[in-house]
Amino acid sequence: MKNASPLTDEQYSLLTKRLRAAAPENRITCSGAIAIAKTLGVPCGEIGRIADKLNIRISKCQLGCF
């Protein structure tokens, strides 16, 4: 999948790997997604955009967005 985000290719690759690993059933909690963003030092919005591209649903959203 092509990196169309402001992340470096390395960040993008690591982020997609982490999201897939954390969402084996294509679902991750909002707090889990935020934790991944913090550990990788990427904006939370990028997590949402990439999760959408990977068909991963974010559940239990703390902001009511997902």
Image: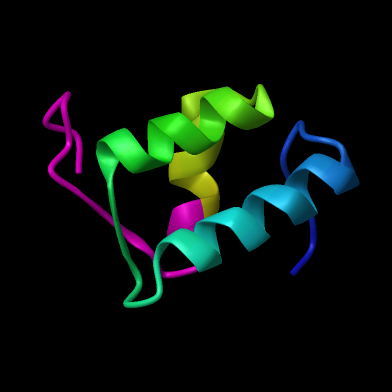
Is residue 59 rendered magenta in the image? yes
Residue nearer the viewer, 36 or 8: 36
User: Of all residues shown, which one is farthest toward the bottom?
Assistant: 25
The reply, left or right, for residue 29 in relation to residue 63 is right
Is residue 20 rendered magenta in the image? no
Residue nearer the viewer, 60 or 52: 60
- Up-down relation of residue 42 to residue 24 (above or below): above
Residue 55 screen position, x and y as percent:
41, 70
Q: Quadrant of the N terminus?
A: bottom right
The reply, left or right, for residue 19 in relation to residue 23 is right
- Up-down relation of residue 22 to residue 6 (above or below): below
Magenta stretch: helix, strand or loop mostly: loop
Stretch of the chain drawn in magenta: 51-66
Residue nearer the viewer, 32 or 10: 32
Q: Quadrant of the C terminus?
A: top left
Colour scheme shown: rainbow
- Up-down relation of residue 45 to residue 25 (above or below): above
Residue 60 screen position, x and y as percent:
12, 43
Residue at x 66% of width, y 22% of height: 41
Residue 27 screen position, x and y as percent:
29, 64
